[in-house]
Amino acid sequence: MGKICVLRLGHRVGRDQRITTHVFLVARALGASEGVLCGDEDQSVLDGTARVRDIWGGDFTVKYEREWKKFLRERKANGWKVVHLTMYGTDFQEGAKKMASSKKNVVVIIGAGKVPTEAYHMADMNLSVANQPHSEVAALALFLDRFFAGKELKKKFSGKLKITPNKCGKIVQRVEND
């Protein structure tokens, strides 16, 4: 199974902090190994995501990248595939299945503002999530679920806090790490 890197393209300070943070939280929780912020540099998003990882566990890293096209070219040169989740692409189910079966590492482009035409051309696949306006957070969750075939829901995290599932209410435990 390949690795997933989520590239948040076109982030705008003052407008996208909450959604961009949610993109990275979903990426972390559902099996991605890396997040890359492109657009406006926003240390609060990077710090907030790192703080969640430090408290709840996992090895998800997030960084800022000024030149998204250069980043994608380098990843592609290293054998990574690029998937862009959009409402204008090809069949989502089929494309996600094909990406998962390829066993390649994948960069998933999630747009904030209007996605530049170059991103559509650089992507190996532009996958349409319902051919309708939608949430990029939901699109990412669907893609990760298809890519990891539900195994991401069984992923174990070793952090300072842990939730114990129960029928009603919440049980949060502080974990003592050696």
Image (spheres, rainbow, N blue to C red):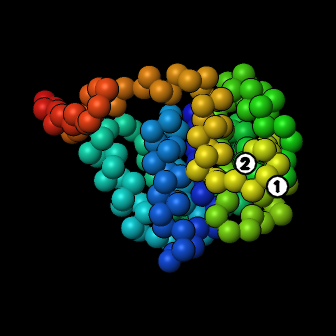
Q: Which element carries disc 2, helix, strand or loop?
A: strand
Q: Quadrant of residue 106?
A: top right
Reading the chain from its start, which is encountered first: label 2 or label 1? 2
Q: Residues within 10 Å of mark 1 (few under 14, many from 20)?
A: some
**Front position among marks 2 and 1:** 2
State the residue position of label 2.
85
Q: Residue furthest bottom?
A: 14
In the picture, the quarter occupied by the N terminus is top right
The tag on residue 120 is 1
Residue 177: percent from the left, percent from the top? Answer: 16, 32
**Relative to 12, residue 32 above or below:** above
Q: Residues within 10 Å of mark 2 (few under 14, many from 20)?
A: many
Task: Give the spatial CA distance, label 2 vs label 1.
Answer: 10 Å
In the picture, the quarter occupied by the C terminus is top left
Residue occupying image coordinates x 79% and y 52%: 132
Residue 163: percent from the left, percent from the top? Answer: 27, 33
Q: Which element carries disc 1, helix, strand or loop?
A: helix
Residue occupying image coordinates x 50% and y 77%: 14
Give left or right: position of 140 versus 153.
Answer: right
Give left or right: position of 99 versus 46.
Answer: right
